[in-house]
Amino acid sequence: MIDEDSSVEPKAVAGSDHFDAAVLYDFSKFLTTLSLLALGGVLTLSQTADQHVVKKPVVAMVVSFIALAGVSAFSAAGKLAKLGLSRRKERLAPQHYLFAAVAFLGMGAGGFLIMWWKSL
């Protein structure tokens, strides 16, 4: 039986600064994994779909956007790990990399959905 009164608030235990960095680190790992999965989907679709429907320049553009999203998310994770070890101020914050990762992933996923819709 679980006692409702014994719940623990993770943010209160870990501290605000450490908890926020941990959440951003988990989010950047999630975006890295998501971009790898999307990249696999685009490459699979480009190999199985009709070559007249899926044009190579469009595939290259979509793959580039998704790859940039993965690199940005991976860079954000690296920055967060580095900031955890040092306390100096960085020129580009991890949030900038995460914003770029979400933007590139959105552009790549949009292109992928258009290619997928045309291949149906």
Image (tube, rainbow, N blue to C red):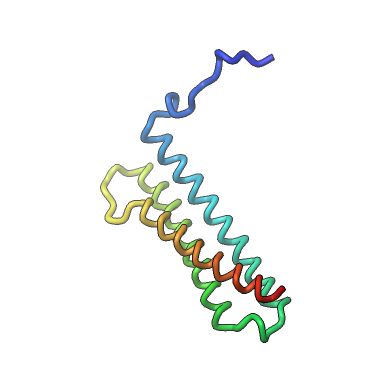
Camera-side residue of 19 and 110: 110
Reply above or below: 1 against 63.
above
Reply above or below: 26 against 105.
above
Residue, far bottom: 52
Q: Is residue 108 left or right of residue 119?
A: left
Taking the spot 45% from the left edge, 40% from the top edge, the residue there is 22
- Residue 1, percent from left and from top: 69, 14
- Residue 106, percent from left and from top: 50, 62
Taking the spot 64% from the left edge, 66% from the top edge, the residue there is 40
Camera-side residue of 13 and 120: 120
| Quadrant of the rendered image containing residue 51 | bottom right
- Residue 5, percent from left and from top: 55, 13
Reply above or below: 89 against 100.
above
Total numbered labels: 0
Taking the spot 49% from the left edge, 69% from the top edge, the residue there is 65
Location of the C terminus by quadrant is bottom right
Camera-side residue of 58 and 71: 58
| Quadrant of the rendered image containing residue 18 | top left
Q: Is residue 68 left or right of residue 90?
A: right
- Residue 19, percent from left and from top: 43, 35
Q: Is residue 66 left or right of residue 79?
A: right
| Quadrant of the rendered image containing residue 59 | bottom right
